Amino acid sequence: MTTQIVDITELSPEEMEKSYLEYRKACYDIVYRNSLTTGVLDKFTSAITFNDFVRQLPVASNKLGAAQLLLDALVKYGALERVDEAPARYQAVKNPATPDVDEGLLELATGKRSLEELRHGENYVGIINALSQSGNPVSASFDGDHIGVWEEVLQAPFYRYSRVQAVREITSNGGRMLDLACGPGFGLAEIAEIVGPQASSPIVGVEISPDFVASASRRNQASPNVYVLRSDLERPLDFLAEGFFDGAMIVGAYHFLRDKEPLWNTAQRLLRSGGVFCIAYALSKMGTYDQEIMDLRFSLREPATYQPSRDDVLGMAAAHGFKTRREFGLGAWRWYSFEKK
């Protein structure tokens, strides 16, 4: 398979998920290989308990949850097996089967042309070292020091796919658009490209990070109908007019909200009847193949995530007067669109 003639935004959700899960298969392999080179798997030549493992590594007291997730990921990969319960003991599997990664699918999802290229650039390799430290060296906060990191992530093909689908979904419904947690402004630019530079169709971005507000403003300075405002989505956006917007989206940020009720109240208040609300790239508790690896990754990030289930999201939508239009998933990452009744 080649990506030379493939526009990923035109793939079906099923095709995109297939390539995304191939990427996560590679991520499990990266964690396994790093566990080999750092000697982690040597500790399991005979069966030991989790408590034995965290003493031997040793693991920082605030990283015990992440250490358990590492073992869960190695079990999922097939490098460890549970040989007892209550308490569980773990033992290394001799010569575990290594995955045969389809590099064409990998390139579709990530833009990386080989598994080897992905290994060199992937920050999963820092996980083992992070377990012994109280801080989170593999995390990236939403500030100016990490904008380069975030801009690279936000343009990754699998992430961009979810965002572009959201942009298309909400702009099919009118021109007055709201991008909640707009980050450095990629979604605003994509909305503006579709809506056009019409002063009568304002596009409003709301973002809590002052550095991201500045970045989004610079990125969209050529579009006079794009406005970027700083505010907190866990508080009411009282400065915006009721029923004004035709569409609203939140991409890649829903799982960072501890209290999601204010967001739903905002969507219900600001959208007109028939308005579309899209939640895209929301990390969720789904039990999919990538769940352990994603939980491990985000256990070492700041700020913390508050992952909903599918039932959580659909329940909130119904309680706030929305009906479901469409949904799909890229593994544990979920995508929904709703219409205000």
Image: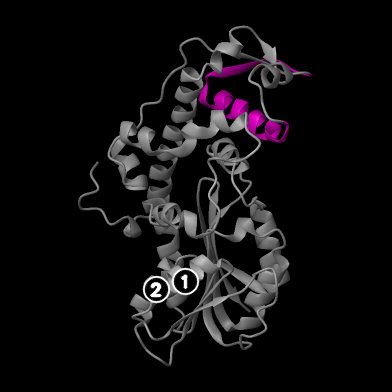
Q: Which residue is mark 2?
A: 218
Q: Position of residue 128 (x, y in %)?
A: 55, 28
SS at mark 2?
A: helix
Residue shown at 62% from the left, 82% from the top: 270
Q: Main secondary structure of the magenta part?
A: helix
Rendering quarter of residue 315? bottom right
- Residue range in magenta is 61-86
Q: Position of residue 150 (x, y in %)?
A: 45, 55
SS at mark 1?
A: helix
Q: Residue furthest left?
A: 4
What amino acid is at disc 1? Ala
The answer to whether any part of residue 260 appears in the image is yes
Q: Is residue 16 above or below residue 98?
A: below
Q: Which mark is residue 192?
A: none
Q: Residue furthest bottom?
A: 200
What amino acid is at disc 2? Arg
Q: Is residue 48 above or below residue 6?
A: above
Badge 1 vs badge 2, beta-carbon distance below 8 Å? yes
Rendering quarter of residue 41? top right
Q: Position of residue 252 (x, y in %)?
A: 53, 58
Rendering quarter of residue 61? top right
Is residue 65 a member of the stretch shown in magenta? yes
Q: Which residue is mark 1?
A: 214
The answer to whether any part of residue 182 appears in the image is no
